[in-house]
């Protein structure tokens, strides 16, 4: 959370927050995620800025991922961070870089 608090604003929409919470609650994942990590994620989501989606986007080969593109566009994101191949294939999307988490971290530490 320090990274978000110091330099970045984490964005969320109602749809992206719902998906994150649904995914981590899946039975095959719930037992793998320690309660401390779940609490950290909940805190992180509380700190995220809620973006109201006014403009719809239909661009991803997996239409269920369009909600993340909508968030980036409507929230005027500087960067999208995702490990999803369908989103990474769109790099850059409407001039918004789409980076894998490892790429983002690598660039961040190499820039300092």
Image (cartoon, grey):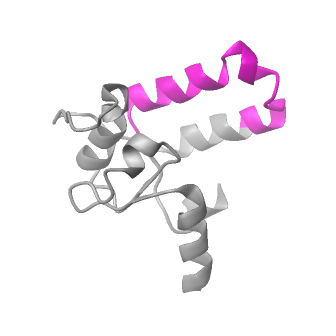
> In this picture, which residue range is highlighted in magenta?
12-39
Residue 83 rendering spot, x and y as whole percentages? 53, 47
Q: Quick check: 85 left or right of 35?
A: left
Q: Is residue 35 visible?
A: yes
Say whether residue 49 is visible.
no
In the image, 97 versus 12, the foreground residue is 97
Q: Is residue 56 left or right of residue 29?
A: left
Q: In the image, is residue 37 part of the stretch drawn in magenta? A: yes
Q: Residue at x 18, y 32 (%)?
A: 56
Toward the viewer: 15 or 83?
A: 83
Report x, y in % for residue 64: 36, 25
Picture residue at 81% right of the left edge, 28% below the top: 32
- Quick check: 91 above or below 20? below
Res 54 quadrant in image:
top left
Looking at the magenta stretch, what is its main secondary structure?
helix
Q: Quadrant of the N terminus?
A: bottom right
Q: Which residue is found at the position 48% from the left and 23% from the top?
A: 18
102 to the left or right of 84: right
> Looking at the image, which residue sits at the far top?
27
The image position of residue 66, as x and y in percent, is 30, 33
User: What residue lies at 20% left-to-right and 33% top-to-bottom?
Assistant: 58
Out of 112 and 1, give the one closest to the viewer. 112
**10 shown above or below 60:** below
């Amino acid at each position: 959370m320090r990274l978000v608090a110091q330099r970045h604003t984490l964005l969320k929409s109602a749809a992206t927050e719902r998906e994150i919470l649904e995914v981590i609650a899946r039975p095959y994942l719930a037992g793998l995620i320690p309660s401390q990590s779940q609490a950290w994620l909940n805190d992180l989501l509380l700190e995220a800025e809620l973006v109201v989606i006014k403009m719809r986007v239909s661009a991803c080969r997996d239409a269920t991922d369009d909600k993340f593109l909508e968030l980036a566009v409507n929230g005027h994101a500087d960067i999208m961070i995702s490990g999803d191949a369908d989103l990474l294939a769109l790099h850059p999307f409407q001039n918004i870089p789409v980076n894998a988490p490892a790429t983002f971290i690598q660039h961040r530490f190499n820039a300092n």
